[in-house]
Image: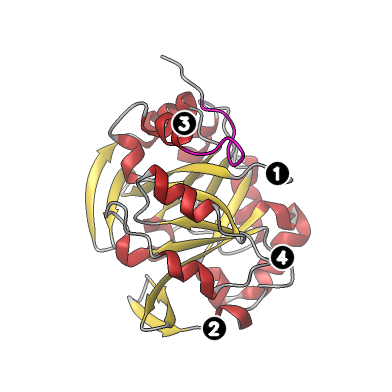
Amino acid sequence: MAYKKRLIGSILIKDGIAVQSFSYQRYLPLGNPVILAENLDRWGVDEIVILSIDNSKCGVEPDLGLLNSIARRVNTPIAYGGGIKNLDQALGVIHSGADRIIVDQLYFNDISQINSIAESIGSQAVIISLPCSLTKGIVSHLNYRTKTLKEINPYSLPLVNQFVASEFLLVDYMNEGSSNSFTDQLVEYFPQDISLICYGGISEGNQVERLLNKQNVAAVCIGNFLNYKEHYFQNIKLEISKNFLRNPIFES
């Protein structure tokens, strides 16, 4: 294997606080997102994903103040998503401390903006989020603003083979918040030559390793379950073959 795959910690933000999400429908408050980010940084995650769900849903601009507060406290690379609608906002996110941006609604509403963003900051700094479900062999995409589903063909999605984005954040939204429930088969419906980050319902070491064994999975993102036990992340790394991941970090 030419490169190490990654374990990512995520922070979901609603109304300015970190929350645990259950299928994008119910939310349990967790606390201050800055403190959660400091914990993830201390525990040695490979990247921190920050998703501000209110910003995209309500048309609010990215929360650059919060992003800047987090970026000043951590050394771990940050990917930020939420409310990014154009190049100026993408640049604002990068200048506020994010290493990469995550776009969702923009992918289906104004794909030309993604091309402009990629030309400016580089395709390696762009991640496209795809909340999806798999039912009876049909892959559907969730528009979480309208709460509507649309059947998609992952092989014919825009930009999939154009290298405008470095990775796709594949969210199993129906299983988000439930332990050990990510739909592994969902990955198999996507092209093998793209890079996926799997997210939603991932909690166990053997589940993580099973997903990382798939050719098109570059990383696994864990949110809710990292927040309850200090050594949860490190223990998952210890369970998984060293051929996959960087060594865990243990700090007090």
Kind of residue sitting beneath label 2: Asn
- Give the SS element for disc 4: loop
Work out whether residue 79 or residue 182 is closer to the camera in this orientation and state it.
182
Instruction: Please state which of the two labelled residues, at mark 1 or mark 2, is closer to the viewer.
Output: 1
Stretch of the chain drawn in magenta: 240-248
**Res 61 visible:** no
Kind of residue sitting beneath label 3: Leu
- Give the SS element for disc 3: helix
Local crowd at mark 3 within 10 Å, few (<14), some, or many (≥20)?
some
Q: Which callout, 2 or 3, points at the residue further toward the start of the chain? A: 2
Q: Main secondary structure of the magenta part?
A: loop
The circle on residue 3 is 1
The circle on residue 164 is 4
Work out whether residue 136 or residue 8 is closer to the camera in this orientation and state it.
136
Which residue, given by chain and number where applicable, does mark 3 sit on?
238
Local crowd at mark 4 within 10 Å, few (<14), some, or many (≥20)?
many
Please name the residue shown 44% across and 29% down the image: 234
Image spot of residue 10 (x, y percent): 43, 45
Please name the residue shown 60% across and 45% down the image: 5
Residue 117, image quadrant: bottom right
Q: Which callout, 1 or 2, points at the residue further toward the start of the chain? A: 1
Kind of residue sitting beneath label 4: Val
Which residue, given by chain and number where applicable, does mark 2 sit on?
153
Kind of residue sitting beneath label 1: Tyr
Residue 161, image quadrant: bottom right
- Per the model, the C-alpha gap separating discs 2 and 3 is 37 Å
Tell me the colour scheme of the image: secondary structure
